[in-house]
Amino acid sequence: MVGIYLAYQPSLTPVAPEQIRRLTKNAAEAEPGLSVVEYTPVPHLYVRHIYRPITHASGASVPSPNGRVEILLHGEVYDSPALARYLGWEHPETLSIEDGPRLIAAGIERDGIDFVERLNGSFLLLAWFPQDKKLCIASDRCALRPHYYTWENGVFLMAPQVEALSRARQQAPPPNPMGVVELLTFEHLLGNKTLCEGIDVFPPASILEPGKSLREYWDFCFDESPATVNRDALREELQTRLATAVHRQLPASVPLGVPLSGGLDSRCLAGVAAHSIKNLPVFTFGNSRSLESKLAHQVALALKADEHTVSPDTVSNWLAHFGLFCQATDGMVSVRHGHAGMLLDTLSSNCGVVLDGLTGGILFGGHMRSETLNKPLPTPAKCWMARPAFGRDELRSQLASDVLRNAMENVEDGFQQRL
């Protein structure tokens, strides 16, 4: 699986080769289309970077102009010309996404690790300071490149898969009961916890110096005061910002695709992109009778888009894809999102960049609004399963404490529906 596999010993003791071998076992280096680089500047730091080279940017480490910092970037930053102007580089308009690593290296050398506050992108960033023997790890504002980390006998371990961390620790992590309750209640976990005890997900907009500090460098700013600007101005500002965000993602040399449900979030993204891309490829999951397919078809016709539909052939086929999708995301998804596996298979064979509107629920309300959280559906849909995976009493017996048993009241409303 693509990502950064890292073992680091803050006490400067060399990392054991056997632990590295366990961490990186089955790390997909032989998978077609992937590139692998190893980075070991000192014996107590080992990094294997596995990535899919969509652009010509290297996934190897990049030194700063004076060698005071070395950068390894998983992902990309979007606005290279703006960073170049800030740094005072000549001809900033000529720089592209591929210049991101050397811009970051130069910026951190000049301004320190706080330079990451200026970055807009999708990335996990390693910054190694050779003179100070210091490692810093930073994520983008929304943690769009998920990685997990844990500690084992004083060694900091990080990987894009929980499975890799379990191998490195030579034991399966115990389940996190509170994480199970949160997933069933809210369809996501709160904070940085995972379903595994002792393993955390790297938080968004954060800078970590393993063994010393973890701090947040950015957060959403929600102004609860009444708007002082009229609705037309707000509408125009939202349209401008949405268009800027979409155009920043439009690729120059690889095909683009948009998962299209016909809903507000994907419709907004597709509408903006269709202004710049003729016959925009859009992809919908469902059969011709489903409401989602009908709505998506209307939107595709209006946008004159190149429409693709991914239809579930059988339940067994759907289940096979759901298993693969859960495996790819370490199971950190709700069951109802399993169809994304089939959709992603089609997208990955057609597109290099995908504009995904899954965060629209947060931007525009949807089920993320507090008043609708955990509210049962008025008419629950028929379940495709012959019976639930386990019943309420069975689940209750798995919960270790009275506190978690009491939390069942929050789970029961939506539990059967989500299974």
Image: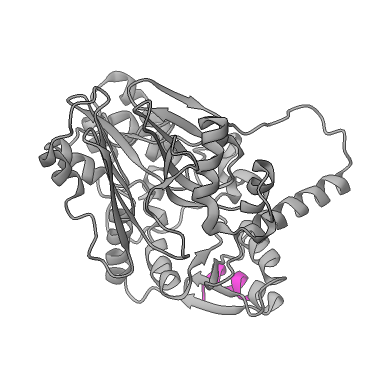
**Residue at position x 51%, y 65% from top?**
353
Question: Given the current orientation, which residue lies at the most extreme front position?
Answer: 66
**x and y, in percent, of residue 89 in the image:** 65, 48
Q: In the image, which residues are magenta?
A: 287-297
Figure quadrant of the N terminus = bottom left
| Residue 53 pos. (x, y %) | 41, 64
Q: Is residue 291 magenta?
A: yes
Residue sitting nearer the eye, 184 or 305: 305
- Closest to the observer, 23 or 313: 23
The answer to whether residue 121 is visible is yes
Picture layout, residue 407 above or below residue 90: above
At a point 52% along the width and 64% down the height, the residue shown is 354
User: Which residue appears at 83% of the width and 51% of the height?
Assistant: 236
Q: Is residue 408 magenta?
A: no
Is residue 412 visible in this depiction of the protein? no
Front-lying residue, 305 or 365: 305
Q: Give coordinates of residue 261: x percent, y percent.
A: 56, 65
Which secondary structure dominates the residues rendered in magenta?
helix
Q: Residue 331 at x, y = what percent?
A: 31, 48
